[in-house]
Image: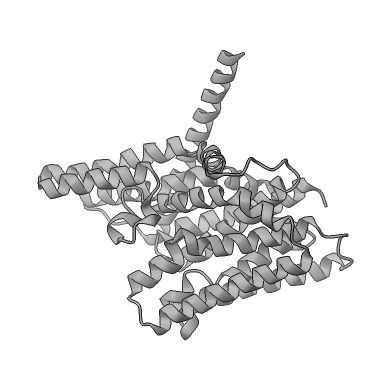
Amino acid sequence: MTDKKLISSLQGLRAVAFLSVVLSHCGAPWLGPWAITVFVALSGFLMTCNYYDRPRTAPGLRSAIAFSLKKIRKLYPLHLIMMAAALLFVLKGLLAQPSARGVLSCAAQLVVSIFLLQTWIPSSRFWFCLNGVAWYLSVQAFLYAIFPPLLAVLKKADVRRLRCIAAVIFCAQCLASFVFWKAGLSGKAAFYLTYLCPVFRAGDFTISCCMGCLYHSRKQESGLPGGAFSLLELAAVLLASGCLFIAARQVGVLGAVAFRYNVLFTPSAVLLVWLLAVGKGIISRLLSAKPFLWLAGLSPYGFLIHQVLIRYMEWTADKFSFTVHPVVWTLTVYLLTLCLSSFYKALERRVRQRHTQTGA
């Protein structure tokens, strides 16, 4: 198995997660938490694999911030563009009903969004302000910042300790979720603490980094035949499907807010990432197909674009008083998102080439 195949199979999973996020904003909200958990698992696992053998970055807060800024630099211009597009809705409301409080609120949201502080403020006024999905970029900026020192620590641990670290963190997250549930926290409080809070998200990110270290340090490929891996991959998909059913139906304790936005999905997400990284099963081969890789290449752009696009589509539909069948609506959202993502990616490539030529 080559690194290219590893990347292909996991990029295919990224494409599926992206499609799930868009679908979650078109009427299937329970898919969103699963997709975000997959994104976090992919991020920790792939970053560990990519940086494990590279020279260690200089320790210190300044170096960590520089690393984070370098990682988010590619998507930050698009973040600003979509933030500005969403700001037009806020300004429209201010023009209709001008008030000093509204202006101050708009200014605060603007500052919070520019500096990616949405998930550090425990107030629902700011979590999804302007371009709502940018909250994940806020979390990622923090995860990128802690990654260099985290990897330095994990590289010193042996296989047994890595497994223990992953198990202890997951148990701690489950215990925290149980405490939140038992304490009867309101839906918003439990939602913030388990889904949006960067510190809590650092838990499943660290688990994924541990799995990346374990994958990197494996002595040899497993002797299991491809058919066995296909069954294991299918089992992981069925496990994820069972978790989605629990979340959608809010079944029992695991269906409560404190569980269904994070820890419910962590085991299946990490397991799926591991199995697809091995890449010996039929699902791995399916996700390595070119259409999935093409979607994966557009997914970072589409993630930031699609929700603001939906708001503009809803405004247009309301303006002209027409209704659209949910299936047609969803397909239209996908199509327009992919078109806009392709356009931005081509524009970004052209600007980068021009800068390269100018620098040369």
Is 146 situated above or below 356? below
Left or right of 116: which side holds 70?
A: right
Question: Which quarter of the picture shows residue 219?
Answer: bottom right
Question: Looking at the image, what colour scheme do you see?
Answer: one colour
Q: Would residue 121 be found to the left or right of residue 4 on screen?
A: left
Residue 112 at x, y percent in the picture: 33, 47
Q: Residue at x 29, y 43 (%)?
A: 110
Residue for point 77% across, 69% down: 160
331 vs 85, nearest the viewer: 85
Residue at the image position 47 percent from the left and 86 percent from the top: 252
Q: Quadrant of the C terminus?
A: top right
The answer to whether residue 288 of the structure is visible from this angle is: no
Q: What x and y, as percent, mark residue 251?
A: 47, 83
- The reply to whether residue 296 is visible in this rendering is yes
Residue 263 in the image: above or below residue 58 = below
As displayed, is residue 227 above or below residue 76? below
- Looking at the picture, tell me which residue is in the foreground, 181 or 42: 181
Residue 319 place in picture, x, y as percent: 21, 48
Left or right, 285 with reference to 168? right
167 relative position to 252: left or right: right
Viewer-proximal residue among 78 and 206: 206
Residue 221, image x and y in percent? Answer: 86, 60
Pick whichever, 360 or 217, lies toward us: 217
Number of marks in the rendered image = 0
